[in-house]
Image (cartoon, grey):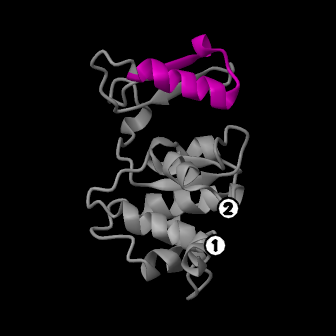
């Protein structure tokens, strides 16, 4: 969110006539409660990205503040430190309590919901945010919530199993 109440979305989605940028602007406008004309969508490039921010999408953080959308699930590489000054920020490294992993991390290990590790931090943080806001999501809600995280190795089935296990759906399915 900008100080004037407008929002800028940086995306690396490619627009080839299918309306991707308009769709993204509509989603941001709806989530933030803004008129669509107050949302601009642009590409993260050194021309438009302050301080040469990264455009990778495998990093996710929680940012506790008013611009928090969907349980404050943000791409950490697109957030300047000055934008979160005075706010609590949790990264993947902050989930464990000493030597004790967070239940989400444990479930990912149990279900082998990782391979190369590229998406793992983002998937775990997104899962944590999802379950914090909705402890018993449907499979459709899970898929929708994680749709912005890409897994190059295709471990989506294992990730889904880990989340279902955490939300109690795995045990219910096993009892049937």
Left-right relation of 30 to 160:
right
Q: Is residue 15 visible?
A: yes
Relative to 73, is 9 above or below? above
Query: What residue is shown at x 35% (from left), y 70% (from top)?
Result: 114
Can you name the residue that lies furthest to the front here? 176
Label annotation for residue 168: 1
Image position, residue 42 (x, y; %): 41, 22
Q: Secondary structure at mark 2?
A: loop
Relative to 84, is 21 above or below? above
Q: Secondary structure at mark 1?
A: loop
What whole-number distance in Å separates the C-alpha atoms at marks 2 and 1?
Answer: 7 Å
Looking at the rendering, which quadrant does residue 43 occupy?
top left
Mark 2, other Cα within 10 Å: few <14 / some 14–19 / many ≥20: some
Query: What residue is shown at x 64% (from left), y 41% (from top)?
Result: 69
Query: What residue is shown at x 47% (from left), y 69% (from top)?
Result: 161
Q: State yes or no: residue 46 in magenta.
A: no
Q: Quadrant of the C terminus?
A: bottom right
Relative to 97, is 14 above or below? above
First to last magenta residue range: 20-41
Label annotation for residue 136: 2
Q: Is residue 102 visible?
A: no
């Amino acid at each position: 969110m900008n100080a004037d109440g407008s929002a800028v979305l940086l995306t690396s989605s490619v627009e080839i006539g299918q309306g991707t940028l308009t769709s993204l602007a509509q989603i941001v406008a709806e989530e933030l409660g803004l008129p669509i004309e107050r949302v601009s969508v642009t590409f993260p490039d050194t021309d438009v990205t302050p301080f040469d921010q990264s455009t990778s999408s495998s990093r996710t953080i929680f940012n506790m503040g008013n611009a928090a959308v969907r349980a404050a699930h943000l791409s950490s590489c697109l957030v300047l430190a000055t934008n979160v000054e005075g706010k609590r920020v949790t990264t993947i490294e902050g989930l464990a309590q000493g030597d004790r992993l967070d239940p989400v991390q444990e479930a990912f290990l149990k279900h082998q919901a990782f391979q190369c590790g590229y998406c793992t931090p983002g998937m775990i943080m997104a899962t944590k945010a999802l379950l914090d806001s909705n402890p018993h999501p449907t499979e459709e809600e899970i898929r929708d919530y994680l749709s912005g995280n890409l897994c190059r190795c295709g471990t989506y089935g294992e990730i889904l199993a880990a989340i279902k296990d955490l939300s109690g759906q795995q045990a219910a399915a096993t009892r049937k």
